[in-house]
Amino acid sequence: MAVTKRGNAKNPTNAEKAVKASQKGNGARKWPPFMSSFVLEKMCALIKTGVRTDKGFKEVHLTAVVKALFEQCGVDVSSTQVYNHLRKWR
């Protein structure tokens, strides 16, 4: 099992630096390509397990992706942000 490095206020991780650098002044989140592909891969994995998506994803599935994203990249996002990012791919 790979150990992920988590940053703090004084020593942010590379993922946190990339997200912070891509933020705009209007508060909109810019998704770096590695985060975007990670979210899409996790959602595809959920679909492969049999999650029905004909009515959209449930909050529990979005929360699972949020937790996995935090564990992998150390970036804190909300389930609403993940949902809105997925809407971009429709």
Image (tube, grey):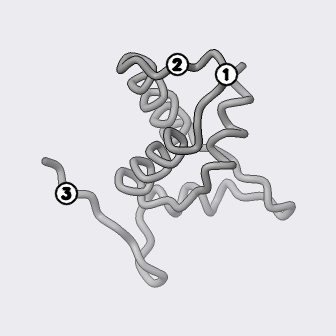
| Residue placed most toward the observer, 7 or 61 | 61
Q: Quadrant of residue 19?
A: bottom right
Q: Position of residue 30 (x, y in %)?
A: 69, 48
| Disc 1 + disc 2, Cβ < 8 Å | yes
Give coordinates of residue 77: x percent, y percent. 58, 56
Q: Residue at x 55, y 55 (%)?
A: 18
Specify whether 4 is left or right of 56. Answer: left
On screen, 75 above or below 89?
below
Q: Residue at x 44, y 71 (%)?
A: 12
Return the residue found at the far left.
1
**What is the spatial separation of the Cα atoms under label 1 and label 2, in whole angstroms?**
8 Å
Question: Mark 1 highlights which residue?
Answer: 55
Mark 1 or 3 closer to N-term?
3
Question: Which residue: 52% across, 19% down?
Answer: 52
The residue to which callout 3 is attached is: 3
**Mark 2: few/some/many CA within 10 Å (<14, 14-19, 20+):** few
Mark number displayed over residue 52: 2
Q: Of the residues under marks 2 and 3, which one precedes in the sequence?
A: 3
Disc marking residue 78: none
Direction from residue 23 to residue 27 in the image, left or right: right
Q: Which of the pair 57/72 is nearer the observer? A: 57
Q: Amino acid at mark 2?
A: Arg
The local secondary structure at tag 2 comes to loop
Q: Quadrant of residue 86?
A: top right
What percent of the width, then of the height, locates residue 16?
Answer: 50, 62
Q: Nearer the viewer, mark 1 or mark 3?
A: 1
Assign a secondary structure to mark 3: loop
- Type of the residue with mark 1: Lys
Q: Amino acid at mark 3?
A: Val
